[in-house]
Amino acid sequence: MINRSVATVALLLAALITSTVSSADEVRPAFLQISNVSDTASTPTYEVLWKQPVVENRRLPIEPVFEPSCELLPIGPPSITANALVQLWQAPCALEEGSVHIRGLQTSLTDVMVRVVAQDGGYENFILRPTDPSLNLASNDSESVSYLVIGIEHLVLGLDHVLFVIGLVLFIRAPIMLLKTITAFTIAHSITLAMSIFELVSLPQGPVEAVIAISIVFLARELAQEEQRRSALTRSQPWAMAFAFGLLHGLGFAGALNDIGLPEDAIAMSLLLFNVGIELGQILIITAFLLLARLWHALTRRFNYNEAHLYTSAAFMMGILASYWAIDRTLVLL
């Protein structure tokens, strides 16, 4: 009984998420760009761009720390966007020959993307995580990452997106319809992600994040209903529901990607890699979830479970968590 097992695993995952995190927004990445703007090789000059995430009107307590001998000189006052505090400094020293450490990262839930731009315009991307908050810029051992990896990480660490995908797996039992629904969700968020990046559509991130949480509440409500009492659209054409909400989730993905930016000379390729990474992350979540469900079923098949109660419990856990997000994000807007 894979459906019974899926509901049980969903319940356990929802309980775990609820106990370990109170806001899905806290995984929004920070961004640090170190650019060599020297006119000559003998007098190195660097510009440092720092985008520090703002969550619930408070900036995350993290900051970059360079070598003590290198003084950062501010270029103008800091500016504030919808999701970040932006600071720009100039450094009259060879930053690429030293290291950078993100103070406070070890106690946060976010990552920091570091982009090092050479004098000829070439660049490398790196990811600093709470478990590894330092980067040796002078070492050739540092491993750069692509937008493919960033896309995977964003999907997997975006708890609201993960919960919506899990909700779709719970909601739809027929494999073919599940495939159609996930495909519709994928196409939809790919459309709005691209439109947002190319500035064809622009919406404030705050309301978008609130409505994304509401989409999970809606899905949880439908899941909690008996099948014959669900809305006609979600019962007969769940792919249409997934497509509509996918448009919103795409705008959420775009918010994170706008935070870290795209290289001007490779926007299309970087966007493609980021989007493919999101799809791979989605596949990983679905595959891991179904494998956990099968494992759970194998361990508990000797016991009798009330399937209806399990689905209802899973739906209520999803709904409670998503309702908290929706209320919290709405209050921030007010």
Image (cartoon, grey):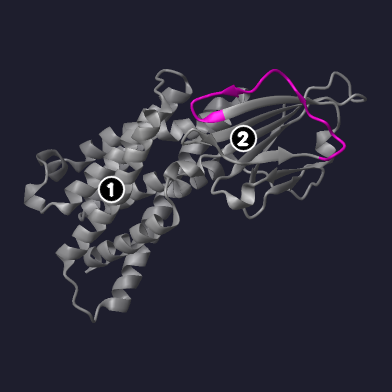
Give coordinates of residue 206: x percent, y percent.
40, 30
What residue is pinned by disc 1?
A: 179
Q: Which mark is residue 31?
A: 2
For the point 83% across and 31% down, the residue is 71
Q: Nearer the viewer, residue 272 or 79?
A: 79
Q: Which residues are magenta?
A: 67-84
Disc 2 packing (10 Å; few <14; some 14–19; many ≥20): many
Disc 1 packing (10 Å; few <14; some 14–19; many ≥20): some
Confirm whether residue 262 shows in the render.
no
Give coordinates of residue 20: x percent, y percent.
44, 57
Q: Which mark is residue 67?
A: none
Residue 221 falls left or right of residue 137: left
In the image, residue 83 lies in the stretch drawn in magenta: yes
**Callout 2, which amino acid?**
Phe
For the point 66% across and 26% down, the residue is 87
For the point 33% across and 37% down, the residue is 212
The C terminus appears in which quarter of the rendering?
A: top left
